[in-house]
């Protein structure tokens, strides 16, 4: 296992490191009652998402350099990217199953099952088709997922200037700025890693640049779909279907 400091990792080492910290496959382990209603479907998906969020936090903590960011930044990054990260994972699992969304090994959806979720399912399926057309490689996938996390800067000025109420360690402005600098370096090394992953494929220089552009454009599609998904989820919440888990801070601060 690599124990080097992240700043001394080559792109190749960084990729093999983030390949190694990929979360395991998830099983829902419950009888899924069919036919689904929108409510029961969302219920199952919420259970799944809660399991995945647990794994996502330990995944993030194993990305070289992430835990050296301020706790405020760690929280804001995860808070703003979690659905995008879940969605990219879902697309990756589904890439070899045209027309299906592989939510988990035991929850696979053909789409036409539930009215309310249909529109978002269709967007997820379309984006998955795009991944398939691009023949996305695993090395590229893990880079993109880490880039979603590191680039999810809802960390705008508001986050910088107010210490959140839950923060009992008073972060200074200087520490926040230092963390922001580290974040930029992390994002840059992840970009280098993606460029390296593309360059391995023996494409012409021209095609490498085009591929990089296509892969990065996927990220804006994913952010768009995530926005729609959030809207859908908050509509649900008003109907009291989704119960929100509040474990994030606890999980980030506990040292495992
Ligand atoms: C996509 C991928 C995936 O692996 C799972 C799911 C499950 C639900 C799906 C979503 C998806 C795709 C889009 C859907 C959505 C349901 C409705 C929407 C179909 O149209 C998402 C279920 C989300 C459940 C919410 C769980 C609470 C999250 C709270 C997060 C939070 O508060 N914090 C602080 C962040 C924690 C970061 C780790």
Image (tube, helix red, strand yellow):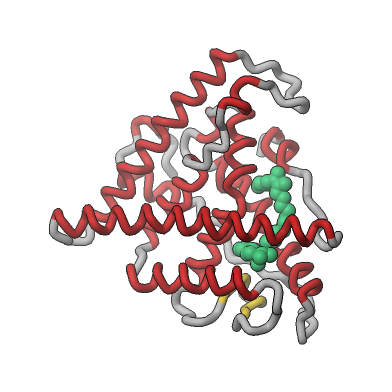
Left or right: residue 53 compared with residue 12: right
The answer to whether residue 19 of the structure is visible from this angle is: no
Which of the 4 image quarters holds residue 67? top right
Residue 238: % across, % down? 83, 57
Q: In the image as oriented, which residue stretches furthest toward the bottom?
A: 35
Q: Give the camera-side residue of 86 and 8.
A: 86
Residue 105 shows in this picture:
yes
Residue at image position (51%, 60%) is: 88
Q: Is residue 96 above or below residue 173?
A: below
253 over 18 or under it: above or below: above
Residue at image x 74%, y 62%?
46
* Residue 58 image point, x, y percent: 61, 46
Left or right relative to 187: residue 57: right
Q: Residue at x 42, y 34 (%)?
A: 186
| Image quarter hosting the C terminus | top right
Find residue 220 and report its horizontal and vertical position in percent.
Answer: 45, 53
Question: Residue 239 placed where, x, y %?
Answer: 85, 62
Quarter assignment of residue 217 = bottom left
Q: Tell which quarter ligand 1 is in.
A: bottom right
Residues 72 and 138: in front is: 72
The number of callouts visible is: 0
Q: At 67% across and 37% down in the image, what residue appears?
A: 252
Towards the viewer: 95 or 211: 211
Query: Which quarter of the picture shows residue 165?
Result: top right
Q: Quadrant of the N terminus?
A: top left
Q: Nearer the viewer, residue 197 or 210?
A: 210
């Amino acid at each position: 296992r690599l124990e080097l400091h992240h700043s001394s990792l080559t792109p190749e080492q960084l990729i093999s490191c983030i390949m190694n910290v990929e979360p395991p496959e998830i099983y829902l382990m419950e009888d899924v009652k069919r036919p689904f209603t929108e409510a029961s479907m969302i219920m199952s998906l919420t259970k799944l998402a809660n399991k995945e969020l647990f794994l996502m936090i330990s995944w993030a903590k194993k990305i070289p350099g992430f835990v050296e960011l301020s706790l405020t930044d760690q929280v804001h990054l995860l808070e703003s990217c979690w659905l995008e990260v879940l969605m990219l994972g879902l697309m990756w699992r589904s890439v070899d199953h045209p027309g299906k969304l592989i939510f988990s090994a035991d929850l696979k959806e053909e789409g036409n099952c539930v009215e309310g979720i249909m529109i978002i399912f269709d967007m997820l399926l379309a984006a998955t088709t795009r991944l398939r057309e691009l023949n996305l490689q695993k090395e590229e996938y893990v880079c993109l997922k880490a880039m979603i996390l590191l680039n999810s800067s809802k960390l705008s000025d508001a986050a910088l200037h107010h210490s959140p109420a839950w923060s009992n360690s008073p972060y200074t402005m200087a520490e926040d700025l230092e963390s922001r600098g580290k974040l930029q370096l992390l994002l840059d090394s992840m970009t280098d890693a993606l460029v390296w992953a593309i360059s391995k494929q023996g494409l012409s220089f021209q095609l490498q640049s085009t591929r990089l552009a296509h892969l990065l454009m996927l990220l804006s599609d994913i952010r768009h779909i995530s926005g729609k998904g959030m809207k859908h989820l908050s509509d649900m919440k008003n109907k009291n279907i989704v119960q929100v888990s509040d474990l994030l801070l606890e999980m980030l601060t506990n040292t495992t």
